[in-house]
């Protein structure tokens, strides 16, 4: 298919996901602002799937957590915990903010609403509505979408770009690489973008799963599977260091999942990749208090209600409380308590008998109990599955991409955006926002470059 170039300029975009589609929309908008007639710029998206926007369609469990509410600085702080990555996405998210994104969607008939925790969803709760709206934007932008077209080779020279997809060859003046990361490969993202960038000399940071469940060497006790620990601390430790998150933790058949685990999984992946002893994971049922405070709390309860069984005390014990009440905690007052399923295991590990009451706990047992509650061993991490990760960390090195324009510092005709870059946001709409924003910036600057 050579020879598409002629009188008009051609902008090729590899990948019709969140970043690629927004790049096409912003490219046309920028061209029109520059007074470039639509016929003078051909925008083509090459997408390996049969439909664009596959990952948006499955995002947020099919509801699409589009972005995060609030001021941009807060969004950046919550969403991008690694400072170099935050610094990188900052200019693009300021250029195309969460407000800009939501206004654009609203203008295409997709009203959105924030939830209490700041996550923003379409009011309809249907991710496909977001995909449909972006497809309408593409139509208005006169962007051509070539589906079923997997780009396998790329050459970028001083005079133009050449892409190979099977037997087909596409030529253009500029290219935007927006082929996504390496996570959840069944949606079309198997790391092609990173490989293509590497093939023309870009440095690549090793790809690792992030926002993923963690599989343990020994699967959890079946009696614990499906149980959620609300607001607990989750700690990972290895000979390479330690890390901590706080949030809900879910016990699964093969290990752990839930928000705290997803957020911590990148650190677990890094420890596993680093070699050495396998990382160990612990749950902290009292993350706001030290072991001494927990022990004193138990002692205090024993003094007030010594005839109570330890198991009853634990069943009624608040989980992850902010303050340790002097009164005997009661499930009717405290909504979230230590799940019943965990109580026998906690007692066994602390060496406490089933029929023991609080008054007969020895000092040693009380200290053991406080220790188990602060450091409940979940197990040893076996793997963090990339195919079950929501995003991948690693990818095209940020040092070789200009964060203000998304332009490659190696190839002036190449722009990179989205998850193929070496950043990864937290759960909460941050990854889609980053993909939309970096895509938006790439599209605008690719056009400015073409017509400057
Ligand atoms: C299950 C799941 C749920 C998620 N939920 C959320 C959420 O609610 N909120 C949030 O913020 N983030 C969420 N994410 C993450 C978010 O979807 C991604 O970070 C975001 O889509 C990345 O955008 P992108 O444009 O970089 O890549 P993608 O959206 O992945 O788009 C890349 C596109 O490139 C195509 N492609 C790949 N290789 C080639 C090739 N060689 N040739 C042509 N085309 C190619 C792919 O098929 C794909 O369509 C979720 C991810 C998953 C897997």
Image (spheres, rainbow, N blue to C red):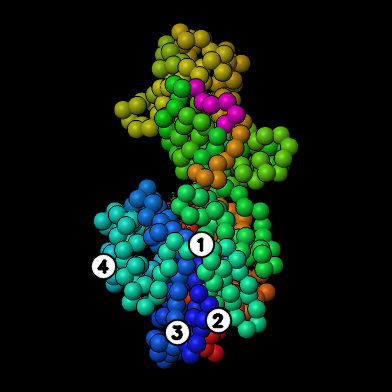
Q: Residue at x 46, y 43 (%)?
A: 259
Residue 380 colored in magenta in the image: no
The magenta segment? 216-221
**Residue under numbered circle 4:** 109
Neighbour class for label 1 at 10 Å: few (<14), some, many (≥20)? many
Q: Secondary structure at mark 3?
A: strand
Cβ atoms at labels 4 and 1 below 8 Å apart? no
- State the image quarter where residue 147 is shown: bottom left
Q: Position of residue 326 (x, y in %)?
A: 44, 28
- Side of 26 where 171 appears, left or right: right
Residue 150's disc number? 1
Neighbour class for label 4 at 10 Å: few (<14), some, many (≥20)? few
User: Which is closer to the viewer, label 4 or label 1?
Assistant: 1
The CA span between labels 2 and 3 is: 10 Å
**Residue under numbered circle 3:** 41
Foreground of the two, 36 or 227: 36
User: Which is closer to the viewer, label 4 or label 2?
Assistant: 2
Neighbour class for label 2 at 10 Å: few (<14), some, many (≥20)? many
For marks 4 and 2 on the same chain, the one whose residue lies earlier in the sequence: 4
Q: Is residue 189 above or below residue 341?
A: below
Q: Position of residue 388 (x, y in %)?
A: 50, 44
Q: Tell whether circle 1 marks a residue whose Cβ is less than 8 angstroms from ligand 1.
A: yes
């Amino acid at each position: 298919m050579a020879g598409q170039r002629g009188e008009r300029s051609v902008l090729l975009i590899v990948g019709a996901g969140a970043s690629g589609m927004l790049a096409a929309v912003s490219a046309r908008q920028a061209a029109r602002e520059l007074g470039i007639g639509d016929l003078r710029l051909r925008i083509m998206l090459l997408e390996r799937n049969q439909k664009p926007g596959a990952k948006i369609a499955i995002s947020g469990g099919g509801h699409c957590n589009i972005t995060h509410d609030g001021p941009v600085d807060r969004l950046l702080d919550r969403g991008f915990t690694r400072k170099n990555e935050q610094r990188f996405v900052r200019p693009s998210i300021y250029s195309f903010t969460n407000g800009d994104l939501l206004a654009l969607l609203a203008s295409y008939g997709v009203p959105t609403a924030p939830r209490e925790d700041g996550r923003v969803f379409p009011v309809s709760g249907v991710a496909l509505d977001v995909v449909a709206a972006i497809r309408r934007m593409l139509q208005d932008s006169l962007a051509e979408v070539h589906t079923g077209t997997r780009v396998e080779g790329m050459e970028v020279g001083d005079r133009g770009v050449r892409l190979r997809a099977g037997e087909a060859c596409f030529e253009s003046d500029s290219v935007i690489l927006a082929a996504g990361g390496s996570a959840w490969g069944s949606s079309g993202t198997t790391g092609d973008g990173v490989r293509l960038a590497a093939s023309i000399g870009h440095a690549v940071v090793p790809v690792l799963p992030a926002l993923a469940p963690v599989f343990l060497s020994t699967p959890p006790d079946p009696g614990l599977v499906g149980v959620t620990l609300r607001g607990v601390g989750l700690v990972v430790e290895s000979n390479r260091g330690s890390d901590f998150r706080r949030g809900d933790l879910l016990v699964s058949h093969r290990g752990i999942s839930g928000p705290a685990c997803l957020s911590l999984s990148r650190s677990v992946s890094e420890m596993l990749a680093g070699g050495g002893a396998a990382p160990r994971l612990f749950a902290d049922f009292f993350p706001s208090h030290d072991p001494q405070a927990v022990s004193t709390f138990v002692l205090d309860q024993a003094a007030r209600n010594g005839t109570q069984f330890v198991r009853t005390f634990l069943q009624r014990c608040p989980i992850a409380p902010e303050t340790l009440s002097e009164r005997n905690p009661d499930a009717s007052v405290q909504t979230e308590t230590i799940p019943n399923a965990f109580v026998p295991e906690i007692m066994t590990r602390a060496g406490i008998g089933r029929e023991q009451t609080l008054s007969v706990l020895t000092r040693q047992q009380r200290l053991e109990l406080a220790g188990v509650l602060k450091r409940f061993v979940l197990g040893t991490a076996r793997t963090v599955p990339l195919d079950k990760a929501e995003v991948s960390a690693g990818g095209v090195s940020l040092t070789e991409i200009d964060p203000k324009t998304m332009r490659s510092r190696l190839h002036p005709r190449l722009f990179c955006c989205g998850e193929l870059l070496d950043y990864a946001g937290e759960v909460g709409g941050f990854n889609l926002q980053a993909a939309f924003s970096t895509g938006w910036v790439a599209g605008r600057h690719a056009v400015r470059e073409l017509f400057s």
